[in-house]
């Protein structure tokens, strides 16, 4: 199962909104086939493993997620498993997709195949946390990424932010962009920095770029707007956004998504719902302090990645990662769990999940 989990990870960034799945076939203590779900719309892990060996009769199949039993973009995996003579299937976790949800296991058992569930469960749950949230709630798994100095600043008092962290930390950010289906920022960041929000790594899958702005002020000459033909750019706006602006943005190839909100801000919970409806299962938030606070206050953040550079810039007016009103009592502070601390070059990287 550990090997199956390793194989599943190879599909990261290429299979969503599908889950990452790996599969290993073994017989009499020997591995006879391996496979993983390589790309969305292509063969599933179980089928790839079966295709990698000539004879699967009497084998045990180790798979990180319950095999599907329905026709989607590909035929049911359960039928292929039964047809190839597999006699035992070991599954890490059940698939909560309503089209599966135990039916795959039941179909295998009805065919006389021994099924065991729960081996490697914790690792599989963690690996597919974004898919599992999305398939149940139809909202994306939101990861808030920030980079700050040792004194908690994301820019100098003059607004300079390039670059607070070092090259290794910035490379990690590009990896995170490639892992997620979309990257989101606010109009303030766009107007100040004119970012591209792409993944600058060889062979990386490019995420959709999302700008959140109630009034649709994304400049048509921005790098985001000019690159809309290379990878999608979406504007999330409030109903009050001027129609001529929306028409001009659409003409430039930018998708415009209306959400609840007013002239000051978009309602974040509704924005996440709309992005989920558009098929976004994972969202990397690279916003300024106000947008970050809006996501946190709306309880839409699932995970935080913070890079901390060993630098001090000071300034009472310099921006911090989270703005807004904040909390008055320490007992009300948002807390991270499952925290890991590591290094990214000279910078410290802290990662954890929101306790809620």
Image (cartoon, helix red, strand yellow):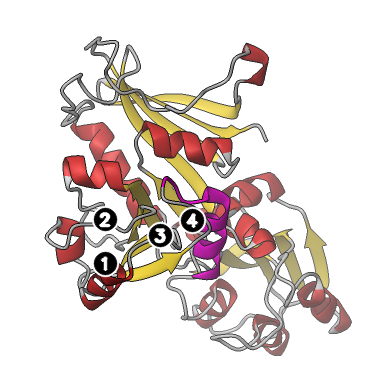
Real-space CA distance between mark 4 and mark 1, rounded to the nearest whole angstrom: 28 Å
Looking at the rendered image, the quarter that the N terminus falls into is bottom right
Residue nearest the viewer, comparing 111 with 256? 256
**Depth-wise, is mark 1 or mark 3 nearer the camera?**
1
Q: Classify residue 34 as left or right of residue 101.
A: left
Which of the marked residues, 4 or 1, is nearer the chain's N terminus?
A: 1
Above or below, comparing residue 3 to residue 15 in the picture = above
Q: Residues within 10 Å of mark 3 (few under 14, many from 20)?
A: many
- Residue 86 appears at what percent x and percent y? 71, 78
**Depth-wise, is mark 3 or mark 2 nearer the camera?**
2
Which of the marked residues, 3 or 4, is nearer the chain's N terminus?
A: 3
Above or below, comparing residue 355 to residue 78 in the picture = above
CB atoms of marks 3 and 2 within 8 Å: no
**Depth-wise, is mark 3 or mark 4 nearer the camera?**
3
What's the mark number on residue 282?
4
Above or below, comparing residue 306 to residue 87 in the picture = above
Q: Classify residue 264 as left or right of residue 173.
A: right
Residue nearest the viewer, comparing 323 with 264? 264
CB atoms of marks 2 and 1 within 8 Å: yes
- Residue 355 appears at what percent x and percent y? 65, 32
Q: Is residue 72 magenta?
A: no
The magenta region covers 264-278
The residue that disc 1 covers is 245
The residue that disc 3 covers is 236
Residue at left 50%, top 24%? 325
Real-space CA distance between mark 2 and mark 1, rounded to the nearest whole angstrom: 8 Å
What's the mark number on residue 217?
2
Q: Residues within 10 Å of mark 4 (few under 14, many from 20)?
A: many
Which of the marked residues, 3 or 2, is nearer the chain's N terminus?
A: 2
């Amino acid at each position: 199962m550990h090997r199956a989990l390793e194989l599943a990870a190879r599909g990261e960034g290429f299979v969503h909104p599908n889950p990452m799945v790996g599969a290993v076939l073994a017989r009499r203590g020997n591995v006879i086939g391996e496979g993983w779900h390589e790309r969305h719309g292509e063969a599933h892990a179980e089928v790839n493993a079966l295709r990698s060996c000539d004879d699967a009769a009497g084998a045990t199949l180790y798979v990180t997620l319950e095999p599907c039993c329905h026709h989607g973009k590909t035929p049911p995996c359960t039928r292929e498993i039964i047809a190839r003579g597999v006699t035992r299937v070991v599954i890490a976790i059940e698939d909560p997709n309503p089209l599966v949800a135990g039916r795959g296991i039941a179909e295998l058992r009805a065919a006389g195949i021994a099924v065991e569930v729960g081996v490697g469960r914790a690792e599989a749950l963690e690996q597919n946390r974004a898919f599992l949230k999305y398939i149940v709630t139809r909202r994306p798994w939101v990861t808030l990424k920030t980079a700050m100095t040792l004194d908690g600043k994301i820019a100098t008092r003059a607004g300079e932010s390039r670059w607070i962290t070092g090259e290794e930390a910035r490379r990690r950010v590009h990896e995170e962009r490639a892992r997620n289906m979309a990257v989101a920022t606010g109009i303030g960041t766009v107007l100040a920095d004119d970012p591209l929000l792409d993944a600058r790594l060889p062979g990386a899958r490019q995420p959709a770029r999302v700008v959140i702005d109630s009034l649709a002020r994304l400049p048509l000459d921005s790098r985001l707007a000019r690159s809309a033909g290379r990878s999608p750019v979406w504007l999330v706006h409030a109903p009050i956004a001027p129609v001529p602006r929306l028409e001009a943005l659409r003409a430039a190839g930018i998708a415009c998504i209306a959400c609840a909100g007013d002239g000051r801000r978009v309602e974040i919970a509704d924005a996440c719902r709309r992005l989920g409806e558009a098929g976004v299962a994972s969202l990397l938030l690279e916003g300024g302090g106000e947008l970050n606070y809006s996501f946190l206050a709306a309880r839409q953040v699932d995970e935080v990645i913070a890079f901390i550079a060993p630098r001090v810039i000071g300034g009472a007016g310099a921006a911090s990662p989270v703005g807004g009103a904040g909390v008055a009592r320490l007992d009300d502070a948002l807390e991270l769990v499952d925290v890991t601390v590591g290094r990214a070059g000279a910078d410290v990287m802290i990662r954890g999940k929101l306790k809620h």
